[in-house]
Amino acid sequence: MAVRWVPALVVAALWWWAVLRVVLVPGQTGFVEGAMVAGGWGLSLLPVHVASEPRAGSGSTRASRRRRSDG
């Protein structure tokens, strides 16, 4: 389980490093820091906007039961 967390923590630490550099010393930052900050911010929006619909045979959730009972 720790094997999955190590890369995530490394990427998070690099992203925060880039954010702090962009905020604290904007004149010395380059393309790499800007790309890391923009990419990380963009990825943070992904789970909100990309959500799969539950499949018909995959069990039911409260929302899907409500939809079926309304219609």
Image (tube, helix red, strand yellow):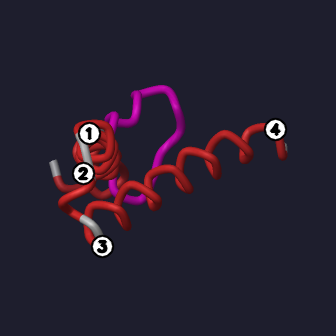
Residue under numbered circle 4: 3
Residue 44 falls left or right of residue 34: right
Looking at the picture, does residue 23 appear above or below residue 4?
below
Q: Which of label 1 and label 4 is nearer to you?
A: 1
> Which region of the structure is painted magenta?
51-63
How many C-alpha atoms fall within 10 Å of the one at disc 3: few (<14), some, or many (≥20)? few
Judged from the image, the secondary structure of the residue bearing numbered disc 4 is helix
Residue under numbered circle 2: 67
Residues at circles 1 and 2 in contact by the CB criterion of under 8 Å: no
Give 57 or 32, whichever is nearer the viewer: 32
Looking at the picture, does residue 12 appear above or below residue 39?
below
Q: Residue at left 46%, top 59%?
A: 17
Q: CA distance from mark 1 to mark 4?
A: 26 Å
Residue 59 on the magenta span: yes
Judged from the image, the secondary structure of the residue bearing numbered disc 3 is helix
Q: Residue furthest bottom?
A: 24
Q: Position of residue 54 (x, y in %)?
A: 39, 36
Give 61 or 38, whichever is nearer the viewer: 38
